[in-house]
Image (cartoon, grey):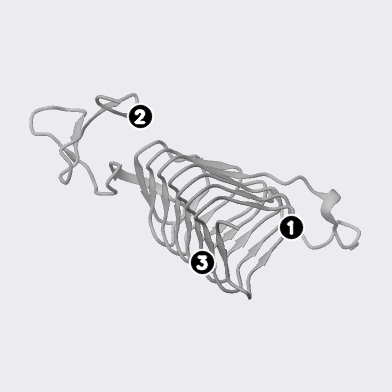
Amino acid sequence: MNYRVQPTAQVAESAEIGAGSSVWELAQIREDARLGEGCVVGRGAYVGTGVRIGNNVKLQNYALVYEPAELADGVFVGPAVVLTNDHNPRSVDPEGKQKRGGDWEAVGVKVAEGASLGARSVCVAPVRVGRWAMVAAGAVVTKDVPDFALVVGVPARQIGWVGRAGVRLVERDGEAGVWECPQTGTLYDEKDGALIERGV
């Protein structure tokens, strides 16, 4: 075994865990879930049946990732984040009979490469969080988030852009639609509501 699982964690036999990954205390990884290499699954985190997680993903303590979520490489999921999977959640049907697995259609959250979900944020499926986007702590995402977007609030709304370093971008003086990362100096062009990284 080339990964680490704490004794109190539960990992289904059919789950796949990539090399160098760590699964900490009281975490649960369900059947047919697939985690890439170098992942960290924090204390009490939950990974649902068949969830797909890329390489170098961090799930902080008590994050809940319900199927059929898909997380790309380098995604950060903060403490107590929830990725939902039901359009119309009910415990029972209209006649009062308890709903079972086949009584509803699961919908998923997709989180693209490098994106970050702040502590206690909620993504209400079905939504996509774009590449390198940043969802602020406590935000509730109810619609797709563009690549590099910074979103805050309930419901989440875009207030700016962030670069790969996670730092808020600043618009260059005298150059409308040109954004710069104050940490790395990388330049981005804004066109039709989308941000495109130069030189990539």
Quarter of the image where one finds residue 197:
top left
- Circle 3 SS class: loop
Circle 3 is placed at which residue position? 42
Mark 2 and 1 residues: CB-CB less than 8 Å, in contact? no
- Viewer-side residue, 54 vs 77: 54
Query: Where, quadrant-wise, is the C terminus in this rendering?
Result: top left
Amino acid type, mark 3: Gly
Of tags 2 and 1, the one toward the viewer is 1
Circle 2 is placed at which residue position? 194
The spot of residue 22 in percent (x, y) is: 52, 62
Number of callouts: 3
Quarter of the image where one finds residue 25:
bottom right
- Viewer-side residue, 179 vs 8: 8
Mark 2–mark 3 distance (CA, rounded to whole Å): 33 Å
Circle 1 is placed at which residue position? 13
- Circle 1 SS class: loop
Q: Give me the residue at 24% from left, 47% from top.
A: 168
Q: Residues within 10 Å of mark 3 (few under 14, many from 20)?
A: many
- Viewer-side residue, 90 vs 15: 15
Amino acid type, mark 1: Glu
Mark 1–mark 3 distance (CA, rounded to whole Å): 19 Å
